[in-house]
Amino acid sequence: MFTARKIFINSLFTTLRGKKYFALKYILQEPNQLDLCSDIDLLVTSKLYTKISLFCRLHPLVDTIKTQVCGERSSLRLYFTDGGYLKLDLLSRFQRCGVIYLEQDQCEEQQILKGNVQTYAAHHLLEHVFLYYFLNGSAVPEKYIRYFKRLPSEIRVLLLPYLNQQYQVNFDKLESLGKFDTTHQVRLEGQLRQMPVNKGYRVLGRRIKQWSDQLLDRFKNWGRIITFSGVDGVGKTTILKRLSEILREEHGERVVIVRHRPGILPILSAWTMGRKAASNFHAQRLPRQGSNSSLLSSLLRFGYYFLDYLVGQWWIQLRYCALGYVVIYDRYYFDFIADPRRSNLRLPQWFTQSLYNLLLQPSMNIFLYAKPSTILERKQELDEATIIQLTERYKSIFDQLRFSKTRATYLSILNEDKDSSIQQILQSYNTQRA
C-alpha cells in the first residue's frame, strides 16, 4: 500500500536526482523500503537545504512541519495528511560535539547510485557507521553487519583492511564491530583531535553554536501534555499505550506516561501503609468503593491532591516538557469534576471545576466514550445507569471547555474502533504541531 510517507519519499529522491547530495547509512535497494521507525539522513549543501525545505513545505501530502536546528544538523519533522510521519535529517558535515570526524570530500569522490539514491561506497559506509556508533559509545547495529556480509566477496574482502589501516584498529571479522570497546572510543577521540580541522578556536566555535542551538530548541520545541479521561472499561489504557508506541517508534518522540496526578505527593494511604502496600491495595480494589460522606474530610482530601496538581504541574514542565517529552496522563483532574466519588470525595461539581482554572492547560485532552453494552463487555465494574450518567457528565464538561479554553484541544471520541480513534487523535496531534 502506498502511504503518503512512501509517495513523499519517492518524489523527494526523484527531485534530488542530479543534485549534490548523498544519503547516509543507506543500505536499501529502494527508498520506499524504509521502515516506519527509520529516518532519512542526507548530507547536503546549504543551497540544497533551502530547496529541500521549500519542497517539503509545498508538497501536497505534507500537512505540517516542525524544524529543529542543532549545530550542523537540521531536522525536518514531517507530518502527513494521512497521519504518517517522517524525520528528515539534513547535515552539512560529519560532526559530533563540535569535532569533525569524517572528511566529506573523500566520500563524495566515490559516490554510487542505488536505485535512484546517491550514496557513498561500501568502505565509506563502513567507516561512517563505525565512527558514528563507536564515538557515541555503542556497537555497530546488526543490520549493518548483515548488509556488509551480503556484499560480493571482491568488495567485502577490502572493507576491514581499509578500516584497520585508516584508524589503527585490528578487526579480523565483521562480527567484531558488533561489540563495543571503550579503548577504541578513546583512541578514536584522540586521533580526531589531532586533525587540523579540530584544533584551536574552530572546535570551540562549533561547540558554542551547537550549545546555543540546543538552548533555543528547548524553548522552541517545548514538550506537550496529553490527557485521557473516560469511565472504567472504555479502553483508555489500550488507546494511550498504542498512541505512545506510535509517537515513540514512528514519530521519534520521547514519551512518559503518568498515572492520574503528577505524583510528587503519594496517595494518602501511603502515609500509613507505605507506598508499595498502598499501591497494591488500590490496584486490587474496585473504583468508587470509598465510604467517605464528610464534607470536611472531602475538602481535606481534595486539598491534598489539588496541591499535588498545583505544585506538581511545574515539576512535570521542568522535568519532562523542558526536555521535549510528550507526557501522557492516564486519567486527569477531570475525574475530580465528573466523578469525585472515584477518589472518595463528596464535593459539588462547580467547586472542583472552578479550581481547574488555576492549573496549566494540557495541550490535548481526550475523552473516550462508548456504548454501555460495549463497556460492559470489557469490564463489569460499573452498572449501565452509572456509565450513562458519568458519560454525560464528561461530555458536558468537555463541551464547555472546548468553547471556553480555546488555547487547548478538547476531544470527545466514540471509541468503538481502535484504529479510528487513534487516527482522530493523530490528526489532531499533527495539526497542533503546526
Image: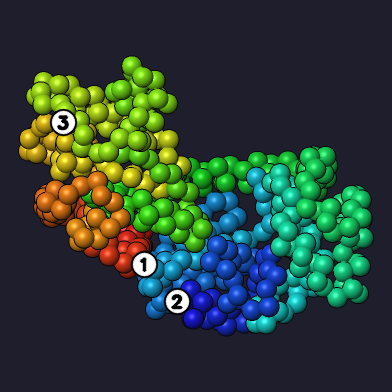
What residue do we see at 51% from left, 45% from top? Answer: 214
Determine the residue positioned at 82% across, 67% down: 149
Residue 424 picture quarter:
bottom left
The answer to whether the residues at label 3 and label 2 have Cβ atoms under 8 Å apart is: no
* Circle 1/circle 2 CB separation < 8 Å: no
Q: Distance between the residues labelled 1 and 2?
A: 17 Å
- Dot 2 amino acid type: Ala
- Please tell me which residue is depicted at 20% across the width and 47% down the height of the picture: 382
Q: Name the residue under label 1.
A: 419
Q: Dot 1: few (<14), some (14–19), or many (≥20) neighbours within 10 Å?
A: few
Residue 158 vs 165, above or below: the answer is below
Mark 3 against mark 2, which lies toward the viewer?
A: 3
Secondary structure at numbered mark 3: loop
Q: How far apart are marks 3 and 2 (CA)?
A: 49 Å
Q: Which of marks 1 and 2 is nearer the N terminus?
A: 2
Q: What element carries label 1?
A: helix
Badge 1 amino acid: Asp
Quick check: 356 left or right of 178?
A: left
The numbered dot on residue 345 is 3
Colour convention of the picture: rainbow
Residue on which the image places disc 2: 4
> Which part of the image, by quadrant, shows the C terminus?
bottom left
Q: Which image quadrant is residue 115 in?
A: bottom right
Q: Where is residue 411 in the image (x, y as percent from the top left)?
A: 23, 57
In the image shown, does 387 or 391 lie closer to the viewer? 387
**Residue 44 spot, x, y in % from top left:** 62, 67
